[in-house]
Amino acid sequence: MKTTFIIAWRNCWRNALRTSIVITAIIMGIWSSVFLMGFANGFVQQRVNKMVHLEIGDLQIHSESYDSDSDITNTIKHPKETLAILDASKGVQSYAPRFKTEAFARSARGQQGIKLLGVYPEKEHEVLELETRLQAGTFLESSLSYPILIGKKLATELHLKLNSKINISFTDANVNQISKNFKVCGIFSAGNDAFDGFTVFVPIDRIERLTGEASIHEIIVKSVEPSTIDILENDLKAKSKGNLVESWKTRYPEIAYGIEMMSNTMFILMSIIIAALLFGLVNTLVMSILERKRELGILMAVGMSRSKIRLMILFESLVYGLIGGPIGVFLGYITIQYYSYNGFDLSSFGEGMDAFGYDPIIYLYLEPKYYLIYTSYILIATFFGGLYPSRIATKLNPITAIRSI
């Protein structure tokens, strides 16, 4: 077998230019596909991470009918008991109760419907990372009588800046119209126009001043271990009666479905690239066999068995995969590691990406298992790619092959 492999190796490099071109094509095809897989995966993961860490948290708790009736009177059932359950749960790292209602914002330059969130600033810091996305000012840590934190998009729409006045109007639980002037203490940018343009934060105690009470409409929960979020969801569901406990996967199934689809897409992409490379590989081997018909005929005539001929062609096919596959995967790994640290800059598309909730800097990411899977796929594929050419070689008639030019 060793002799057969040595012969196969030498056969590959008899035409060094052709072999180099085929191997280079394999390397470039695999390298580019690994890069695309890492880019696509990083693109999806960035959106998920932004939503979970900046907007929605690991889990959310609402009353069971809140989604169908988000009236200001539809609050968390048994709030004290629910908070006590969260305090006692070992799977909960932190949580943030919120007052939530639809409101109307007016400035001297415009008006806009908004989502008003009354929050405990210190608890929001423990659950979400929105304070890390401040463009100016503070996250409600202000000496202002009525501070408000707004998104960059809303600030642009209403021509607001720090210390600008903004009038907030909403209807309280007693159907009284509440209207109050707030001052902008901070401006954030979550990189999502839908969130930045319609969400404002105020201290929950200011809501209590205006309405006489500060009802809790939702609770954002951060888990100790994100990988066990499903277990925590089921545990809290069993304990929190009358309320709806949902992980981000349950509440936003389209995002979870997008992650699953991305995994399937990567396997499809690998298959397409490998299939395309196989066409070139099989074509090269067939051409090589047709050029060596006389040589193969002589080998069979002097006693080389057809099984060894077949094995030699398979080894020739494997040479391409053994060189091109690992090098292509390794170059892809190096590229992804570089861009996972430095990011891939799409700033020229930044404004358009914000509209869909993406940052202009994409940090590439690919799970380690895919490198091993891809390398294995390539080696298996190149082995099977040599089956058809080896069959052609073993079907040759030695006498006819020797007489060929």
Image: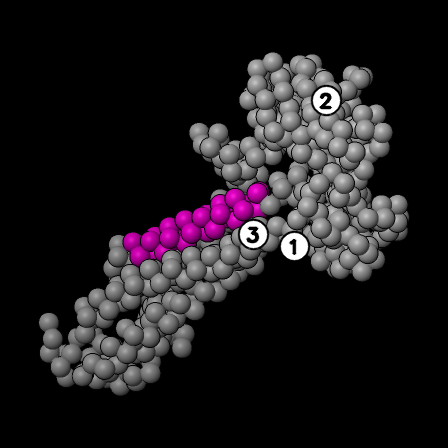
Reading the image, the residue beneath label 1 is 250
Seen from the viewer's position, the closer of residues 239 and 384 is 239
**Position of 337 relative to 384 (above/below):** above
**Position of 242 relative to 315 (above/below):** above
Q: At x 71% / y 41%, what residue is drawn?
A: 71
x and y percent of residue 302 in the render? 23, 84
Task: Kindly indicate the quadrant of the structure image that contains residue 359.
Answer: top right
Q: Is residue 322 visible?
A: no
Reading the image, the residue beneath label 2 is 179
Q: Secondary structure at mark 3?
A: helix
Seen from the viewer's position, the closer of residues 45 and 317 is 45
x and y percent of residue 106 in the render? 63, 20
Please count the marks in the image: 3
Q: Is residue 77 visible?
A: yes
**Position of 242 relative to 220 (above/below):** below
Callout 3 amino acid: Glu
Which residues are drawn in magenta?
21-47
In this picture, residue 180 sits left or right of residue 297: right
Reading the image, the residue beneath label 3 is 254
Q: Secondary structure at mark 1?
A: helix
| Mark 2 or mark 1, earlier in chain | 2
Disc 3 to disc 1, C-alpha distance: 9 Å
